[in-house]
Image: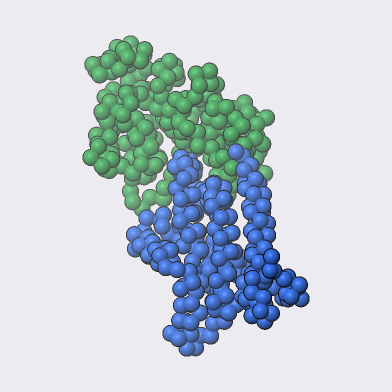
Amino acid sequence: MIKVQDLHKTFGNNEVLKGISTTVQDGEIIAIIGPSGSGKSTFLRCINMLETPTSGDIQINDQLITEKKTDLLKIREKVGMVFQHFHLFPHKTVMENLTYAPMKVLKISKENAEKRGEELLKQVGLLEKKDEYPNRLSGGQKQRVAIARALAMEPDLMLFDEPTSALDPEMVKEVLDVMKSLTKTGMTMLIVTHEMGFAREVADRIFFLDGGQLIEDAAPTDFFNNPSTQRAKDFLEKVL
Amino acid sequence: MNLDFSAIADSIPYILKGIGVTLEIAAFACVFGFILGVLLSLIKLSGIKPLQWLADFYTSVFRGTPLVLQLIIIYMGIPQMFPSIDISPMPAAILAFSLNSAAYISEIIRGGIMAVDKGQSEAAQALGVSYTSMMKDIILPQALKNIIPALMNEFISLTKESAIVTVIGALDIMRRAYIVGGATFHYIEPLLVAGLIYYIIVLILSYAGKLVEKRMRIGD
């Protein structure tokens, strides 16, 4: 369970998050949408402390991660993240990308890490690419590897930061399909996305952010069919 | 042309023996300079202000004064300031060149580290990888690949510039060429020989550098 309480984040003079509070239950799929600059990515990045909140509390599984003395590495082991620009390790093969953190952080043997790596690559349909370097892969393949890399740590929670925004249109579907199959495993997922169709289809709840505030928190059918705020209506008019 | 190499022919093996001395200084200075350079660059990027100031000050001193002066101060100054320490030319030369090249190398590496996409460290952090492992396994390998040409350049210039150890009497190629000149009264010939030796060493190093670069390009 994730509990966020009055989360604020300021960059210089720019207050990006203006007090966000919410709770996400285990196994929930949350799609976070909103105009650019609304603080979606910052909100997501606060959840694994890639951004340090200016104030407010975040609890993951009853552990207060915003406390100074929290061991962030331990938290991050359990929180997988997928980035817009993949950020695969270019000097490591696909398999090495998948096995590096499990071996280094979880101290899993190479043999077991590779076994798990192969399962994951099969799951994302890229087993035949295991010995390739990332630069030989297409954008969609890179992102699928990046998802597998995050899953290799067996996280409780997955964060997706605009996972399809940097992809050519014809590659969006293959990544969304992998994510869709992941939703069926009971994984808790927070997804910042511009793919409205996808959000509507897979999400349990939609977070609509605007101006650093969580303006709407609703089931997809409610949100897309009759949004309760004018700002959400305006936004949906533009993107749908 | 008034050049007579036959007069120094017998002395050429003597000059060639200087290759070992020159390479010894250069090799040790490369290794120590590189290690110290990595440490300095990590300190510079550590975010710990007093340590950063110290590293920056170190760099400014060694970049801001002539190498030959640093060499003489280490060779002559250390025994004067600490009479119990007796430093001979070779250790003094290696020490001076190591300290000096560390300053330059630290800047090269710092630039290399900063040029690595910030997403790389974020991806490593998001996977729960510790700072030390991240630097060692993810960031430095990528940084090094990008700075191999600059590092090779530094090592090559180090090899050449080691000729100034002549001033403290280390028996390198240059010093031996001088000695042969003095002994045979043919000054230019041994220097031309020395020049040729340096040139060949540098050619070999450049070639080796290209090979290393090629190997590091795997995955590009």
Q: Please say whether residue A222 is visible from this viewpoint.
A: no
Which residue is nearer to you in this view: B37 or B175? Answer: B175
Q: How many marks are shown on the rendered structure?
A: 0
In which quadrant of the rendered view does residue A174 lie?
top right
Please state the horizontal and vertical placement of residue B109, each as a whole percent of the image. Answer: 49, 54
Colour green, chain: A
Q: Residue at x 23, y 16 (%)?
A: A230
Q: Quadrant of the C terminus of chain A?
A: top left
Q: Residue at x 59, y 34 (%)?
A: A135
Which residue is nearer to you in this view: B28 or B20? Answer: B20
Q: Please say whether residue B154 is visible from this viewpoint.
A: yes
Colour blue, chain: B
| Residue at the extreme top of the image, as rendered | A225
Please state the horizontal and vertical placement of residue B116, each as a whole percent of the image. Answer: 48, 44
In the displayed structure, A143 sits above or below A112; it is above
In the visual, does A215 lie left or right of B38?
left
Q: Quadrant of the N terminus of chain A?
A: top left
| Residue at the extreme front of the image, as rendered | B1
